[in-house]
C-alpha cells in the first residue's frame, strides 16, 4: 500500500513538473489550446473592465453636472446635492454587480498566469496551487460568483466612489454654511424636516459608507491589488 501511494505521489509530482514545458520555447512560443483559452479570458475580462469604466464615467459626469447646477445660483436648493448622493449610490450598486462578473474572468486569468505562464517562465519556483486544474475545471463546469455583494461594494467604494461621495459631502457642507441665508442648522432643513435631523441622517449615512469601505474581513477577490510595491532605484 505504501509503495503504491508513493508511486501515485511521484506520478503527480512528475505531472506538475511537466506543466508549462515547452510553453515559452523559442520555436513553439505560447501556443496551443491553453494560450487560446488565456486570450479568450483576457478578452472577456477586458469587456467587463470596460463596463466598469463606463459606469464610473457616467457617475463622474452626473456628479459634475450636479455640482455645477447646485452652485450656479443661491436660490438653488442644497438638497439637490443629497439627491446626487442617492444617484451615486445607485451607480455604485450597479458597478458592484458588474465587478462581481468581472472577477469571474479575472480570477480565471490570474489562475492561468500563476500556474501556467509563471511556472513556464521559472519552474524552479514550483506551483502555487497544486489543485488549480481541478478548481479551474469546476469553475468552467459550474460558473459561480466568487465575491459577495458587500465585498464588491466595499471594493468600489475604496477604489472610486468614496472620493466622489467625499466631494459631494464637502460641497453640501459648504453650501449650507457659506452659501445660505440662514445659519446652521436651519440652513440644512428640507421642508418640514429640521436641519438637525437632516444633518444627523447625512452623518449616519456617510459613517455607514466609511464602515463598509474599511471592512476587510471577507476579501475573496482573486489576488486583488491592495498594496503598492514601488521599485527602489
Image (spheres, rainbow, N blue to C red):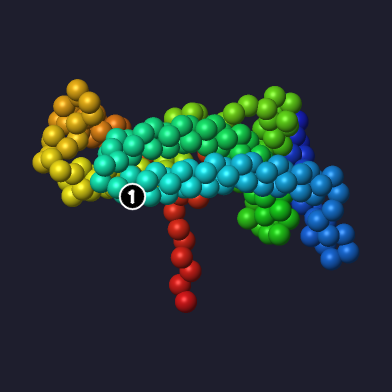
Q: Residue at x 19, y 31 (%)?
A: 189
Q: Residue at x 67, y 47 (%)?
A: 46
Q: Is residue 94 visible?
A: yes
**Residue 109 occupies which quadrant of the picture?**
top right
Where residue 41 appears, x then y in whole percent?
72, 43
Closer to us: 219 or 154: 154
Which residue, given by chain and number where applicable, does mark 1 sit on?
72
| Residue 208 placement, left or right of 142 | left
Quarter the N terminus occupies? top right
**Residue 140 occupies which quadrant of the picture?**
top right
| Residue 150 placement, left or right of 107 | left
Closer to us: 6 or 135: 135
Q: Is residue 167 visible?
A: no
**Residue 173 occupies which quadrant of the picture?**
top left
Where residue 169 appears, x then y in whole percent?
29, 43
Q: Residue at x 43, y 34 (%)?
A: 87
Closer to us: 39 or 17: 39
Farthest residue, direction left:
183
- Circle 1 sits in a helix, a strand or a loop, which is it? loop
Farthest residue, direction bottom:
233
Q: Residue at x 46, y 65 (%)?
A: 230
| Residue 118 placement, left or right of 78 | right
Where residue 47 appears, x then y in whole percent?
68, 44
Label 1: how many residues lie within 10 Å, few (<14), some (14-19) or many (20+)? few
- Residue 15, placed above or below residue 232: above
Amino acid at each position: 500500500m505504501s509503495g503504491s501511494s508513493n508511486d501515485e505521489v511521484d506520478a503527480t509530482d512528475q505531472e506538475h513538473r511537466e506543466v508549462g514545458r515547452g510553453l515559452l520555447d523559442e520555436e513553439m512560443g505560447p501556443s496551443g489550446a491553453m494560450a487560446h483559452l488565456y486570450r479568450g479570458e483576457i478578452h472577456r475580462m477586458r469587456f467587463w473592465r470596460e463596463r466598469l469604466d463606463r459606469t464610473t464615467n457616467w457617475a463622474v459626469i452626473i456628479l459634475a453636472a450636479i455640482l455645477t447646477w447646485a452652485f450656479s445660483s443661491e436660490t438653488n436648493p442644497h438638497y439637490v446635492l443629497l439627491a446626487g448622493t442617492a444617484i451615486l449610490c445607485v451607480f455604485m450598486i450597479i458597478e458592484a454587480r458588474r465587478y462581481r462578473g468581472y472577477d469571474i474572468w479575472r480570477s480565471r486569468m490570474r489562475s492561468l498566469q500563476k500556474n501556467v505562464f509563471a511556472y513556464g517562465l521559472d519552474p524552479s519556483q514550483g506551483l502555487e496551487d497544486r489543485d488549480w486544474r481541478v478548481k479551474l475545471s469546476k469553475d468552467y463546469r459550474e460558473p459561480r460568483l466568487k465575491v459577495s455583494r458587500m465585498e464588491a461594494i466595499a471594493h468600489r467604494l475604496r477604489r472610486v466612489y468614496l472620493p466622489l461621495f467625499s466631494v459631494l459631502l464637502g460641497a453640501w457642507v459648504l453650501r449650507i454654511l457659506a452659501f445660505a441665508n440662514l445659519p446652521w442648522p436651519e440652513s440644512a432643513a428640507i421642508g418640514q424636516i429640521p436641519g438637525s435631523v437632516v444633518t444627523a441622517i447625512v452623518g449616519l449615512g456617510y459613517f455607514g459608507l466609511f464602515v463598509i469601505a474599511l471592512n476587510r474581513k471577507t476579501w475573496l477577490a482573486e489576488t486583488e491589488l491592495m498594496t503598492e510595491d514601488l521599485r527602489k532605484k
